[in-house]
Image: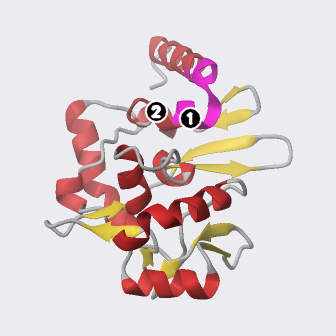
Amino acid sequence: MVQIDDVVVSLDVFKEKFICNLDACKGECCIEGDAGAPLEDDEVEQLEKALAVIWDDLSPAAKDVINKQGVCYRDRDGDLVTSIVKGEDCVFTCYDEKGYCYCAIEKAYREGKVDFYKPVSCHLYPIRVDKHETFRAVNYHRWSVCHAARELGKEKGVPVYQFLKEPLIRKFGKVWYDELEDVARELKEQNLI
């Protein structure tokens, strides 16, 4: 573990290799799991604001869930998460002509229709950020659906922190990320990663 400001970073974030391989997984992370994507409190308003733009891209079942319970709910741990359809798909999950899952919010963002990319927890995956009383913990999350991403990351030699540069900067800032890269260089010099 290393600490930058109030953020404790697992060495796995430096050691493990990862590159999403959509051709292999087809976006399975949007449809698997027992709860929706973790949300920050201020993201709920952004999701609700995006609804008007993405509504036609959502499935009828997703629209029904949103009409009944909204864009999010509290899971069994009391955490705020995106609403899900039939215990699987995130309500913002859509499918393309190849059957790949994609996020309707991210699609609208890339098309310049909304200014919210998607929940930061989705953007950061496979990193999970846990809040504690005096610090935040950045951990690498291993999930079987991402096996192909780990293989591609190993093949290309891309560590998790490099693959997730953009969302890490989004979450913690450029200065923090620059320090993370400095720490990575030091760990390499010491043969710790």
Which residue corresponds to the image point at 55% horizontal and 75% vertical from the top-left? 35
**152 relative to 53 in the view: left or right:** left
Secondary structure under tag 2 reads helix
The picture places residue 153, in percent across and down from the top left corner, at 28, 39
Quadrant in which the N terminus is drawn: top right
Which residue corresponds to the image point at 48% horizontal and 54% vertical from the top-left? 122
**36 relative to 104 in the view: left or right:** right
- In this view, the residue farthest toward the left is 98
How far is mark 2 from mark 1, CA to CA?
Answer: 6 Å
Which residue corresponds to the image point at 74% horizontal and 50% vertical from the top-left? 131
The picture places residue 123, in percent across and down from the top left corner, at 47, 47
* Magenta span contains residue 175: yes
The amino acid beneath tag 2 is Glu
* Proximity of marks 2 and 1: CB atoms separated by less than 8 Å: yes
* Magenta span contains residue 187: no
Magenta residue span? 168-177
The amino acid beneath tag 1 is Arg
179 relative to 8, above or below? above
Determine the image quadrant of residue 183: top right
Quadrant in which the C terminus is drawn: top left
Label the magenta part by its dominant secondary structure.
Answer: helix
Residue that numbered label 2 is attached to:
166
Q: Residues within 10 Å of mark 2 (few under 14, many from 20)?
A: some
The picture places residue 110, in percent across and down from the top left corner, at 36, 45
Which residue corresponds to the image point at 61% horizontal and 56% vertical from the top-left? 46
The picture places residue 169, in percent across and down from the top left corner, at 55, 30
Q: Residue 101 versus residue 129: which sits nearer the camera?
A: 101
Q: Is residue 65 visible?
A: yes
Residue that numbered label 1 is attached to:
170
